[in-house]
Each structure stands twice: as C-alpha cells, then as structure tokens.
Image (cartoon, helix red, strand yellow):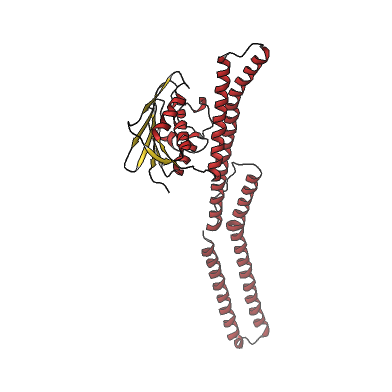
Amino acid sequence: MRTGGTLRSIATLGLVAVASLALLAAILLDTRRAYVHEAALNRAVDVAGACVAIASVIAVALGSWWLQTHALEPLANLARAMARFGGGDVDQRAAVEGPAELAAMARTFNEMAESVSRQRKQRQTFIAGVAHDLRSPLGVLRMSTDLARMSDEKLPPIVIDAVRRQVDRLERMVGDLLDSLNVEAGNLQLRMESVDVREIAAETARAHQGVSSRHVVELDVPATQVPLVCDGMRVGQILSNLVGNAIKYSPRGGRVTIRVTSEDDAVVLCVSDEGVGMTPEETRGVFEPFRRGGTLRDGVPGWGLGLFVVRRLVDAHGGQIQLLTAPDRGSTFRVSLPYHHA
C-alpha cells in the first residue's frame, strides 16, 4: 500500500463526512422555522454535534491505525534490525515491508549487510590462510636454526637450500600482500621501457625450472625479438605468478608452457598447464582477492592474491587477460599487452 494513495483515501473519507454533516446542519437550520418548540431545535443541534464528534473519533482512529500498521511498526522493525546488526549480529536482515520508501530503505540495508557479511567471511578466510601459510616456512626455519645451534659443524648444503627456499617463499607471500595493498590504494607505478619479451619469458622459465621435480617448464618463443614498451619487472611478475599458479594446480606434474607470440597490435603471453582445471562456476571471481579456483584450494599454499595482482598489472598496462579451462583438462591464461599504451 502506498503512502500517497492511503492518505488520499483518508482525506476523501474525511471530506465526505464533513460535507454530509454540513448538509445535515443546513437542513436543520433551514427547517428551524418549522419547529415551534425550542426544545426540538436544541435536540436537533445536539444530534448534529454528536455526529461531528463521532466522525472525528472515527477519522482519528483510522489515522492512528494506519500510522501504526503501515509506517511506525515497519520503521520500528527496521530500527531494531539495524541495532542488532550494529551490535554484532551480522546475519540480521530487515523485513521488506511498509510504504515504498521504507521498503526501499530495508532493501538497501539488507544489501549493505550482505556485503559486510561477505567481506567479513573473506577476511576470516584470509587470516586463517595467513596463519597456516606462515606456519610451514617458519617451522622449517626454526628446525634449521635448532640444528645449527646444536651442531658445531658447518651447515650442510641441503639445510642451507631448504632455508633459502623458505625465505624465498616468505618473500613472495609478503610481496603479493604488499602489491595487493598498493593496487587497492592506487599506488601502483609503472617504469616503462623497451624490452624484449622473450628475455623476460626465458628468465621466468629458468627461475621455475627447479621448483618442482615433477614439472617441466617449457618455453615457446619466436626466433626474432619481440619488443614491447612496458614495465619489464611487472611483466616478469605477471609471468612468474601465472607459472607458479600452474605448478600449484598441477599436483600430478607435467608440462607448464610459456608461449610468446606477436599480433598486429599486441604481444600475447600464454601460460598453460596440465592440471586439475576448473568448472565454469569455479572460474567466477578467480581474479578477486583471497579467492582460489579448482578442487585443491584447501591444500594449496598461498593467500589467493597472485591472480588478483596479475589482473591489476595487466589492467595497468592497458591489456586483457583470459582464462581457458575445463575440469581435468588443465588451464591456459592468455595475456594480451598492447604495443601502444598511454
């Protein structure tokens, strides 16, 4: 029921009542000459006054009833829902009821509450992931330092390599976190220069070649130079994050291929794997922070920031990124970086 329509209906009833009473009063006054006895005239006037009083009481009662059921009660319900939400009940929602304006307010509140609740769950997942992912490398570092303290001999190379790998892992995790914060704050700066993209791809392949004994990182690049004006370090970060993601989601091993091609208006970088792949539902939001795709997300290290950073770096270069994937068919990330970007 709309506020304007209800008020017009009440106003119409009131006008009809007043008009009827006015007509009755006019008839009584016009016929007063027919009443010779003064007592009869007084009784008629009393009847008219009583009618006016009864009509007023009815109008006030109807108005109070409408305000209570259609305005005040829905407003009170909305206020209670807001108070409970503010008190920590993040699952609290308001009933969409009452006049159009109040119903719109309730819908807006529910949308806001849903967004806050979703962000809260993501934050909880993120904190749990941070605690889990930091515990593993820190445990290795603690064990290595304990061994070094207990032994008078020089640390064996295998221990030094293990410590180095864990330090590198921590640096990558912290780097992803800092990059995501800079992206969100709009502080990401590019240092543009002319580079040969083949060299960036080759360096990325060398850096990941020994990461996993079950994976082989292959390189497919043209025989001639592939020049591009870009931030070479950031393009290397794009490829490194994509290759690292491919290795993590290929638990059975296999090939990870870095392919570089030139098109008329852009350089295209593709990273393909033979991993678990993703369903269409799992690909939704894959570039959002703290999100992971695929069926192995619970056992894969990381904070779910790598692809988010990749997407923002590609956007900063004026490029595009696509994901081609299917369950048990692997995934291919295709990055297109334009030659000319203002």
Q: Give left or right: position of 237 versus 117.
A: left
Of residues 53 and 330, which is closer to you in this image? 330
Front-most of residues 86 and 30: 86
Write the residue at 41% across / 31% down: 201
Residue 278 seen in the current view: no
Residue at (64% x, 46% y) in the render: 86
Q: Quadrant of residue 21?
A: bottom right
> Residue 198 location in percent, x, y?
39, 32
Q: Where is residue 159 in the image (x, y as percent from the top left)?
A: 58, 16
Q: In this view, does 296 lie above or below 103?
A: above
Q: Is 76 placed left or right of 224 in the picture?
A: right
Determine the residue positioned at 55% across, 31% down: 173
Position of residue 198 relative to residue 75, above or below, is above
Q: Nearer the viewer, residue 71 or 256?
A: 256
Residue 287: image x %, image y %?
Answer: 47, 38
Task: For residue 262, say whether it is visible.
Answer: yes
Q: Where is residue 230 in the image (x, y as percent from the top left)?
A: 44, 41
Residue nearest the viewer, comparing 335 with 66: 335
